[in-house]
Image (cartoon, rainbow, N blue to C red):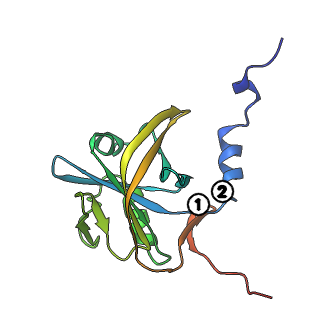
Amino acid sequence: MTAAPSELAVTPDLFRRALAVHASGVVVITAQHEGRPSGLTATSFSSVSLEPPLVSFYVDRSSTTWPSLRAADHFAVNVLAHDQAELASRFASRGVDRFAEPTRWRPGPLGAPLLQDVSAHLVCLPYETAEVGDHILVVGLVVDADLRGPGRPLLYHQGRFGRFLAHPES
């Protein structure tokens, strides 16, 4: 008799601790539906394909923000800069108006909120979603990109936000 795959899996606590040693970039996903902006912080952002230009992120199935993001006809990926840890925390918090002061934003070319002072904006059309474990994989087709500068990224590592320091060149 063979064990079921779930019986072979590590515990959620061990898995969480192991993944904590992997640094990841930080983005805020924003959208507008029925005139109301919504957004959330994601550290699971990734490029998927160059042809066509696709990106992805994961959102927890229990997210209270996901229903409004899912209902929107497009979304924006705001790539956070090294000095935007407070903004990342704000969009990761529950029970707060994420778009109130001190958040600075403007409507993008299709209406999705674009956060100010970020490293880049990617405006995306929904391309595909899939339920994967306790999360939803969201894939977007990039229809507009705006690079704000080559600044340093905000990173997430060991449960904290931090900054990237380049290794000195030899």
Name the residue beneath numbered marker 1: 159
Tell me the amino acid under the disc marked 1: Gly
Q: Residue at x 84, y 11 (%)?
A: 1
- Cβ atoms at labels 2 and 1 below 8 Å apart: yes
Question: Which sits in the foreground, 139 or 95?
Answer: 139
The correct choice, above or below, for 121 with respect to 61 in the image is below
Residue at x-position 29% and y-position 57%: 96
Q: Which quarter of the picture shows residue 117?
A: bottom left
* Residue type, label 2: Ala
Q: Nearer the viewer, residue 103 or 73?
A: 73
> Which mark is drawn over residue 78?
none
Q: Residues within 10 Å of mark 2 (few under 14, many from 20)?
A: some
Quadrant position of the C terminus in the picture: bottom right
Gap between marks 2 and 1, in whole Å?
6 Å
Position in image of residue 138 (x %, y %): 45, 43
Badge 2 marks a residue whose secondary structure is loop
Residue at 72% in and 25% down: 5
> Relative to 78, does residue 119 appear above or below in the rendering?
below
Q: Nearer the viewer, residue 90 or 111?
A: 111
On residue 20, which mark appears? 2
Which numbered disc flags the more N-terminal residue, 2 or 1?
2
